[in-house]
Image (cartoon, grey):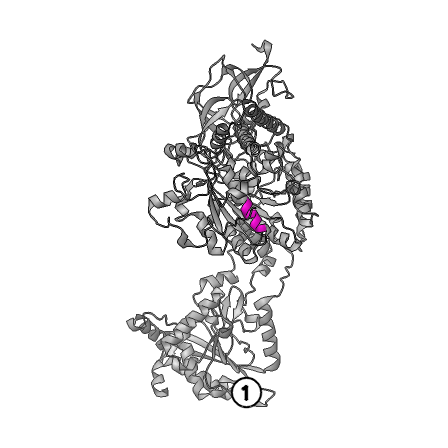
Amino acid sequence: MSADGTVRTVTLPDLGEGLTESDLVEWLVAVGDTVTLNQVVAEVETAKALVQLPSPWAGVVEALLVEPGTTVPVGGPLLTITVPDAAPTAGRSPTASPGDAAPHPAPAPDATVPEAAAEVAPDDADQPAAPAAPAVSERTSVLVGYGPLVEASARPHRRPRSAAWLAAHASANAHGHGRTHARPAESDRADEPGGTVAAPPRPTPPVRKLAHDLGVHLERVQGTGPSGQITRDDVLHALVPTGTTPPRATPAASTASTSAATTSATARPTTRPTVAPATPAPRSATTTASHDDVRVPVTGVRRQTAAAMVTSAFTAPHASVFLTVDVTPTTALLADLRADRAMDRHRITLLALVAKAVTLAVRDHPDLNARWDEPAGEIVRHAHVGLGIAAATPRGLLVPVVHDADTLRLPQLADALRELTESARAGTTTPADLSGGTLTITNVGVFGVDGGTPILVPGQSAIVAVGAVRRQPWEHEGAVALRDVLTLTVSFDHRVVDGEQASRFLADVGRVLARPASVLAMV
Amino acid sequence: MLRSDVSAGHAREGAEQRTTGSSSGAARGRANDGDDADDGLVRLVTTAGDRVEDPVHDPWVVDVDDDALVALYEDMVVVRRFDVEATALQRQGQLGLWPPLVGQEAAQVGSARAMRPDDFVFSSYRENGVAYCRGADPTDLVRVWRGTALTGWDPWALHMATPQIVVASQAVHATGYALGCRLDGSDAAAVTYFGDGATSKGDLHEAMVFAASAAAPVVFFCQNNQFAISEPVDLVARRPLADRAPGYGIPSVRVDGNDVLAVLAVTRAALDRARRGEGPTFVEAVTYRQGPHTTSDDPTRYVDTATHARWAARDPILRVERLLGARGALSEERTHDVKEKAEEFAHRMREGCLGLEAPPPLSLFDHVLVEPTAALRRQRDEHAAYLAMFDDEAVR
């Protein structure tokens, strides 16, 4: 028959958008039939629809290559047609290759597809496992815009990445981004033996972002993920000196591990464990992976904190006094209050009790709740206590204020403290909550230290640091016993307050905590 | 002579004029079903091919003699023929996708032939019949669907913008263009085509607010083909779609979208209104998509055969054939010529399609911006490096 024409093979096209196979339902022609262009020769069922297949040529059916019920991959041969040499579709190549049905790459299948599927290199990291025989795939109705189930498909065969590609890619990156961090690894990579080794897949965008934030050079990190891909854990490991546990003092860790988020942000730099920059980048300077100094831009809260501390340190002459006190009755009271059903809805903390003690004690020592007004040449004694609470937040140190704290009863004070620290950590503190402070408490005890000498918030005359409660041997009723012991510090503006007032004030605070019942004598 | 104003008579200025506001299923069905009997649609030719009198709309088509009607008939036959050819090309793997329009020929041809060359069309992806009437080459119609071009034709040559895939976005473009026409002092108008599904999209409503506010010379031409992909129009429209426009201060008209003469009349009236500075009009052409949403769709899963048969009887080409036949205006020779022209156009489409070459991949970056930016150059360089990873020469 080929004597009077050319035998051409009709292959199965992609009838939907991204379909990989179809089932032959029925032949509508038989061998020897004469067919016209666009005459329907078969019905096939795709994942989307029952579809009638029109013949791409006029001619005579030479052979039907598959049985009804067969699943045919896209590009697979269906039937052959003998096309007269002077067919109306003239101008086409007369070769009878199966690819003829689709000479152009656009949406058309071609005969190389099955080969390509078989050629997927097993060591090619970017390819999924070699396509298996078409598995049982769920038949779902799929409409425009929604791709069908991803089935095993043939894709162009990717070559391993070459050094040339890496160089081109890297330089394209460097040009485009203009990032400040250099990429020294490009040359390292080129020095690798072989030069054309398959590179591991790029880390995922969140991991790259993390590495960028932490100042970790990905080029120096060994990936442990699939095909050597760098994972989140790899980046975090690169931060930690090998063989040691992560330093507990990393801001992220301490913030996460403490329930109360107050901090000694106002403590002197040498004793400031937690004045966290928004990003913990400086830590990476101590890693084994990097020996470079890291320069962190000073912005936002960090800049404001720095300015406030300088202002305070260079205008108000600071002095400090300390008191270590047995607060066992207070911790017992705390246990009682927490067991009290009336207090159910309020989370009473040690900080709340200290805050209450401070507001009570300051009534007899008004200069601790005062302000030096230099232009007026006056000392301003405040009518009420705006109690600042230093809070370590992801953004840095914030000091939200409990307004009129002296008028609040203990449960309300505890509630206010909790709300302020929560909103500070959530980043929802309002400007109003950050102003109006007259006296501040910093709870460095949550970080496990005994005390410090905090720096005043500008415009205030006193700041109280609360240390950690420690169970330790202490004199009690003439004998040594294990007691809950706490160190209090007050730093004060020596222009306003002398050591006498500060000491008496601190002693009164300590007395309340040592003997809560003494409050009965004060009210 | 052509003085009729769609804001009178058949236009819907207020909801109280409608009687199909009931939420019962039957009433809703009627509201969107082009049943000939008392359906309230503007109609000049019945399903049976009878010319009916309509004093309001007859004046708009008084110039349409038998020859002009045959020309409209020819347009519809050609449009249907190449639409079927394009569907076949998709089934043969030559197009990635095709959105058939069979059944909507009258709505597209009638409205497109009402326009002047300097009017501007902003369409969705199904208006290939409109593009044909605007002078599109057969190959122009398939470039995008073969994936060899981002747009099929020069929009300024056809005065027809690149069809929009994003539903209803073209309504905003049309309104903006229409405002430009006014600023230019031109009496040209914009016509935007969209389907019933697009009436649920925000862009259309934003466009109508602006068009009404500025009295922009734009015609909102809705082809209500009964289905938003697979969702029947009754699901989203408890009242006729045309009832939505008066809420914006835009008069609307419901026309039998399978009656090419009636569509021509109402679109002429709407365009005339726009040219006279009286603002936008909303045309709801009630028609029916006889085929699938696209070649990826299977309408047998959501259309029952009775519905399909009812609409097939109202075929837009059939009724003109009957009318012309009754008038003795369609000779065998003329019929043959029309068929020849349709075959020839379809043949040219096939040849043109098969001859389309895939553009080099990197040409993708050439038409994004007038002048490339550093970021775009970097993306192009990266993509070039990426393509270099493949053994297959064809992808490069």
Q: Identify which residue, B267 or B359, lies in the foreground.
A: B267
Q: Name the residue under label 1.
A: A496
With B142 as the anchor, is A477 left or right in this view? left
Q: Is the magenta stretch mostly helix, strand or loop?
A: helix
Total marks shown come to 1
Can the viewer see residue B29 in this picture? yes
Above or below residue A218? Residue A513 is below
Quadrant of the rendering where the C terminus of chain B is positioned? top right
Instruction: Out of B145 and A416, give the one closest to the viewer.
Output: B145
Q: Which residue lies furthest to the right in this view?
A: B371
Question: Where residue A424 appears, x then y in whole percent?
Answer: 48, 68
Residue at 54 percent across and 89 percent down: it is A379
On the image, the x and y values in percent for residue A312 come to 59, 78
Residues drawn in magenta: B268-274
Q: Where is residue B56 in the image (x, y as percent from the top left)?
A: 49, 46
Secondary structure beneath dot 1 equals loop
Q: Residue at x 38, y 39 (%)?
A: B37
**Position of residue B236 measured from the top left corner of the image (x, y, whole percent):** 41, 47
Q: Within 10 Å of the Cα at label 1, are there few (<14), some (14-19), or many (20+) other Cα atoms?
A: many
Q: Quadrant of residue A109?
A: top right
- Is A207 within the magenta? no
Write down the chain letter for disc 1.
Answer: A
Q: Which amino acid does label 1 sit on?
A: Val
